[in-house]
Image: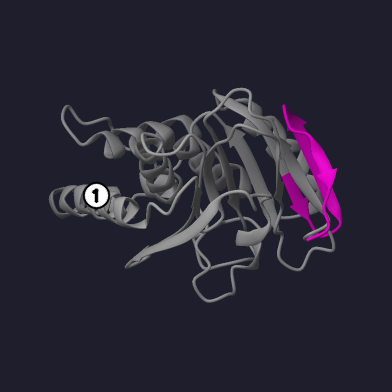
């Protein structure tokens, strides 16, 4: 989970999508940058309000959901977004709020697919996408010399997909690590978000990269991992790195 409200989100334009219509939706802490076949801003805003309301009401009754840094038990009854966040946290070994940005992006994006064959929803560095042609997603890694130089080539197979980034040096989200970027690719953006946080917590120095990747491999459901710290990079899984010129 990464939300860098206090820094210009230049990376929002680092996905090749000139053929799609861009628009934003901002509600309190939620700040989505969406690309679709048409301007679906009004529909997207209603969805953001719906899912934020579900989360806020659940937190009112269950304050541990907001504050816990450890996995929580799965409740017998809760909205789907709550259940997905708790399950993602349990898989990755973190609290459910580690998955909130990816979860909102995923829930909104999936419903917008009823109105557009292609959807890209970015929420503070966490991305849900369903694409019909190859796209390049640039990697933002703070002050690392690799920022803007490399990206992920995403193919339309295995859609939809989550591509989520956690950073110990960018933004104000809680991270116990110091990686400039931990990028996780998974079928679920909710899981990818939680996993990126958990893996990022393992990286305090470049020598930790290999161990963090091994830890990430133990989290079921991940397709790939990229870790950047300074000029050091490690990668595993079904990820295709490429040069970018953003």
The x and y percentages for residue 231 are 86, 57
Q: Can you say whether 164 is above or below 25 in the image?
A: above
Give how far across and how far down residue 69 sits, in percent.
40, 49
Residue 201 visible (yes or no): no
Q: Which residue is mark 1?
A: 55
Magenta span contains residue 206: no
Q: Quadrant of residue 74?
A: top left
Q: Looking at this view, is 217 or 8 the one in front? A: 8
**Relative to 219, does residue 26 appear above or below in the rendering?**
below
Q: Residue at x 81, y 51 (%)?
A: 150
Whole-percent x, y for residue 229 in the image: 77, 55
Residue in front for this viewpoint, 92 or 10: 10
> Is residue 163 shown left or right of residue 226?
left
Q: Specify whether 13 is left or right of 49.
A: right
Q: Quadrant of residue 158?
A: top right
Residue 75 visible in image: yes
């Amino acid at each position: 989970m990464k939300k860098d409200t206090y820094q210009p989100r230049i990376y929002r334009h680092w996905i090749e999508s000139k053929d799609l219509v861009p628009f934003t939706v901002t509600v309190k802490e939620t700040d989505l940058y969406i690309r679709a076949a048409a301007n679906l801003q009004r529909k997207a805003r209603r969805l953001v309000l719906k899912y934020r309301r579900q989360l806020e009401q659940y937190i009112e009754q269950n304050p541990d959901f907001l504050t816990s840094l450890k996995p929580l038990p799965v409740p017998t009854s809760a909205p789907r977004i709550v259940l997905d966040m708790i399950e993602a946290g349990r898989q990755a070994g973190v609290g459910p709020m580690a998955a909130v940005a990816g979860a909102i992006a995923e829930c909104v994006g999936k419903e917008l697919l009823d109105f557009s064959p292609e959807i890209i929803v970015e929420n503070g560095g966490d991305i849900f996408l369903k694409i019909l042609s190859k796209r390049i997603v640039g990697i933002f890694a703070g002050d690392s010399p690799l920022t803007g130089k490399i990206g992920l080539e995403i193919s339309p197979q295995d859609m939809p997909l989550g591509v989520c980034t956690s950073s110990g040096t960018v933004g104000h989200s809680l991270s116990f690590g110091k990686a400039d970027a931990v990028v996780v690719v998974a079928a679920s953006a909710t899981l990818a978000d939680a996993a990126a946080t958990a893996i990022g917590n393992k990286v305090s120095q470049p020598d930790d990269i290999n161990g963090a990747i091994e830890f990430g491999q133990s989290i079921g459901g991940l397709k790939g991992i990229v870790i950047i710290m300074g000029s050091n990079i490690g990668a595993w899984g079904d990820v295709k790195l490429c040069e970018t010129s953003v």
